[in-house]
Image: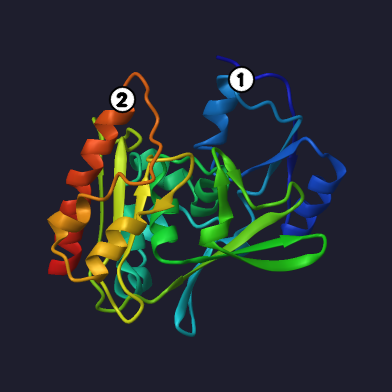
Amino acid sequence: MIPPPFAYERAQDVEHALALLSAEPEAKLLAGGQSLLPLMRLRLARPATLVDIGRIRELAYVREEGEEVAIGALTRHHDLATSELLQAACPIVAATAADVGDPQVRHMGTIGGSCAHADPASDLPTVLLALDATFVARGPGGERMIPASGFFRGLFETDLAPDEVLTQIRVPRTGSRGWSYLKFHRRAQDWALVGVAALAPDREGPAVALTNLADRPIRAAGVEETLAAGADPATAAARAAEGTSPPSDNVATAEYRRELVKVIARRALEEALAR
């Protein structure tokens, strides 16, 4: 389908993007376009203006900052997957990015766009929630830090204000901590029916987050609690469906997803603990 009419502006830098957003309340940011443009073609999104930030080079990087790795919001999935720094310091992010969509999506899609779009079936938001990542947003009032636990608010909804730009995501170094992100999908380029991000216990305990089991990525508190108490992966994974509200669609029912997530959670926990 053809999207409805819209105006188009290309931002030269972050400040220019903020000015354009302030001038047009119905504007939407365009990064890689792999999430927004399909919605526009289906007429599920109807922005009056697209503000293209995809060429702002200052927002595309992966670099060390103390005990964290700072990732520019416009870093492409392919660049995450091939980053030697991420592969060494926080490999779950690199490995997950390498399995997003297909090569075209990975070369165009950005981590910031994926997170700001807030599709509950998306992979990287779940991983970032498990990592307790920090999101950096810039708006007219300056910069603010948003913890992952408060960033995703609902279906396609985040804590970002309409006049803010997501500029950076900060993830901790996981070092030798075991990890896994597993998902179940029919074809490589399909959205995950369910997905599980798992981090082995460390001084702060295990971390487990779920994809497509609610209207946003969520932590599997029951699984974390049981694993921290010393249970085996199978026993802990049996609680994976607690507190979830998965969708039913033409691909799978909610009941199917609730049963499937227990299987994927067990496998993810086993892989994380074995690393």
* Residue type highlighted by circle 1: Arg
Q: Residue furthest right?
A: 23
- Asked which secondary structure carries label 2, the reply is loop
**153 vs 38: above or below:** below
Specify whether 9 is left or right of 265. right
Can the viewer see residue 206?
yes
On the image, numbered disc 2 is attached to which residue?
A: 253
Label 1 and label 2: CA atoms lie apart by: 25 Å
Q: Which disc number belongs to residue 43? A: 1
- Which one is earlier in the sequence, the residue at label 1 or at label 2? 1
User: Mark 1–mark 2 contact, CB under 8 Å?
Assistant: no
Can the viewer see residue 179?
no
* Residue type highlighted by circle 2: Thr
**126 vs 52: above or below:** below
Residue 80 percent across, percent down from the top left: 40, 60
Please tell me which residue is depicted at 22% across the width and 38% down the height of the picture.
260
Q: How many marks?
A: 2
Please tell me which residue is depicted at 28% across the width and 37% down the height of the picture.
258
Residue 225 percent across, percent down from the top left: 30, 64
Please tell me which residue is depicted at 21% across the width and 53% down the height of the picture.
237
Q: Rate crowding at label 1 as few (under 14), some (14 to 19) or many (20 or more) other CA atoms within 10 Å.
A: some
Residue 11 percent across, percent down from the top left: 73, 49
Locate residue 211: give its quadrant: top left
Specify whether 31 is left or right of 200. right
Residue 235 percent across, percent down from the top left: 15, 56
Q: How is the image coloured?
A: rainbow
Q: Nearer the viewer, residue 198 or 231?
A: 231
**238 vs 179: above or below:** above
Name the quadrant of the C terminus: bottom left
- Asked which secondary structure carries label 1, the reply is loop
